[in-house]
Image (spheres, rainbow, N blue to C red):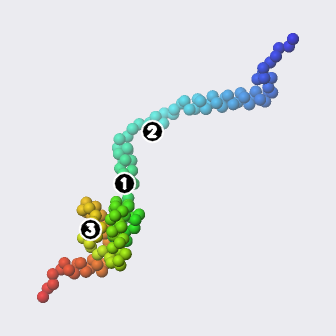
Amino acid sequence: MPKKRSFAFRSFRTQRVAFFLFLVLIGFQIYLENTVPEEAIDILVFDAALQEQIDSAKLQKQQPRIFPFNPNYISLSKGYQLGLSLEEIERLHRYRDTGKFINSVTAFEQITQVTPSWLKQYSPYFKFPDWVTAEVEKRKKPKNR
């Protein structure tokens, strides 16, 4: 009686060659993943000075740059970015709906009722029209007679 062969041994020659090549490729991949070149070890050394530069760059990137702006035209999104509460923005918009403009930092503070710390931080960025600033400068100068 002839011996029965399993399916693996009865396969065609091309199938056996393909299976053998597949095993060789798997073995080669495992070998490549487990070997680490010496250059990669040098890269992994911790450099404190470089890490400090990276951290400072990340902090600068996170802090948005503030450009001078006219406080009369603060939108909801701009107010949110500046840290104003919704009530403060609403007070400003109600005042502007009457057709009036804010022409000084003190007027802005009175109308919106912002905190002094907020005002101290953002008032240097307030940019009023030139005719308003010129008028304020005239008032400050004493009149010569």
Q: Is mark 1 on a helix, strand or loop?
A: helix
Measured Cα–Cα span from mark 3 to mark 2? 54 Å
- For the residue pair 96 and 60, the one nearer the viewer reads as 96
Q: Hey, which residue is sitting farthest top in the picture?
A: 1
Identity of the amino acid at label 3? Glu
Identity of the amino acid at label 1? Gln
**Residue 92: % across, % down:** 34, 70
Question: Residue 73 vs residue 20: left or right?
Answer: left
Numbered disc in front, either 1 or 3:
3
Q: What element carries label 2?
A: helix
Residue visible at 12% across and 88% down in the picture: 145
Residue visible at 54% across and 30% down in the picture: 35
Numbered disc in front, either 2 or 1:
1
Residue under numbered circle 2: 43
Residue under numbered circle 3: 109
Crowd class of label 3 (few under 14; some 14 to 19; many from 20; radius 10 Å): some
Q: What element carries label 3?
A: helix
Above or below, 114 against 50 in this view is below
Residue visible at 29% across and 75% down in the picture: 103
Measured Cα–Cα span from mark 1 to mark 3? 29 Å
For marks 3 and 2, the one nearer the N-term is: 2
**Residue 122: % across, % down:** 30, 64
Residue visible at 45% across and 38% down in the picture: 43
